[in-house]
Amino acid sequence: MRFQVNRDVFSEAVSFVVKLLPQRNPQPILAGVLIEAGDTGLTLSAFDYEASARTTIEATVDEPGTILVHGRLLSDIASRLPNAPIEISVEEDGGIAVRCGSARFTLAAMPVEEYPSIPEVSGTSGLVPAEDFSTAIAQVGFAASRDDVTPVLTGVQLEVSENTLSLVATDRYRVSLRDVPWDGEAAEQTALVPARTLQEVGKTFGHAGTIQISFSGAGDREIIAFTAGNKTVTSLLIKGNFPPVRRLFPEQTDHHAVVSTADLTEAVRRVALVLDRSAPLRFTFDTSAVTMDASGGDQARASESVDAHLNGGEVTLGLNPQYLLEALGAVKSEFVRVTFTSSDNANKLSPVLITSQTSVEKAGLDSFKYLLQPNLLLR
């Protein structure tokens, strides 16, 4: 096999396909990138049985063929080669020669015949706006659990209903939800996608215009695919039943406060500096301000107030400052609305609902919703 390819195009392609591979893989063969050279150019693929990435790029192919080479090493080399065309060929002893300008590398070939087949996805599909989908992933993905003890909570639930695709995630202490337009088959469909994979899709495809999402498979091999331009990412779905968290969102939202997103963010960051790890931050909402109070070890204390517009009675509650900051970072508006929900159980704290607000009087234009469970304050 022998081909010549643009250095920047090749480097970007290799970087894309290795991005989803785990840093340490128990099976060395899965650390490889499969490169197929043919009449249509180069196809580069990587697969670890759970996620795959594939892209096709233009190249001048003198001798078609297929090679398997260590992906991260090839990515590191390609990103540091001089600005000149790259030539890759298989030498007589089976080694893989990489030439670029005056730089020369020889890499070991991995056995192609031992590499698993890249999954193909064909089934229910539709299109979503790439920018909206990428933003939605950023607004929802962080709320997924990082604890593998409960796998279903480490994923983001995708739900297709008519012309809407919903993204939902929870770690039991909070729930994040966002809707984006769906243009495709209207059949109801759900898929529980690993949050890490979905977040990489959001970063990679955010400026692609549109993204095609396809659902395929059944039983233990249910798969979802995301395609934009010449790139495709597939992921094995997480098995299990996602908790019915939609019912937790309140219908009545009269009791609320509106605060400047930036002012609240900066104040929470400052006051939380004195808190012990995992301790809640005390918030008191009154008619004209929200006051934050914190006390930590070594008798450290902090307090700060920010202007707020309150509709309803005064409220005092404790919130995890990091969880609140992540929600404020997801709000893409000048103001944020904090709604105080009610519960039939007088002994149980009711969650707060955080949504975007374009002005003091006007609600945000997006569908972002974030429920956060308050912490018990020791009085």
Image: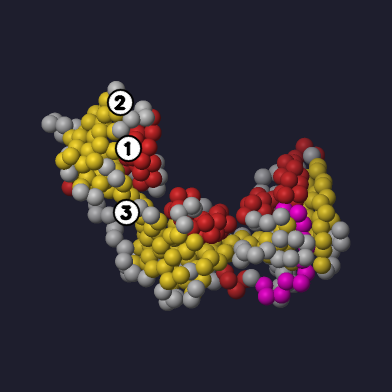
| Residue 116 located left or right of residue 222 | left
Residues at circles 2 and 3 in contact by the CB criterion of under 8 Å: no
Q: Amino acid at mark 2?
A: Gly
Mark 3 highlights which residue? 49
> Would you call the spot at circle 1 few (<14 residues within 10 Å), some (14-19), or many (20 or more)?
some
The span shown in magenta is 250-261
Q: Is residue 275 visible?
A: no
Snapshot colouring: secondary structure
Instruction: Label 3, secondary structure: give it.
Output: loop
Disc 2 packing (10 Å; few <14; some 14–19; many ≥20): few
Residue at the extreme top = 102
Residue type beneath disc 3 = Tyr
* Secondary structure type for disc 1: loop
Chain-order first, disc 2 or disc 3: 3
- In the figure, 318 relative to 276: above or below? below
**Residue 93 at least partly seen:** yes
**Position of the C terminus by quadrant:** bottom right
Snapshot quadrant of residue 94? top left
The residue wearing badge 2 is 101
Residue 297, position as x, y percentages in the image: 75, 40
In the displayed structure image, the side of residue 67 where residue 324 appears, left or right: right
Q: Is residue 210 magenta?
A: no
- Front one among 170 and 129: 129
Q: Tell whether 131 sits left or right of 7.
A: right
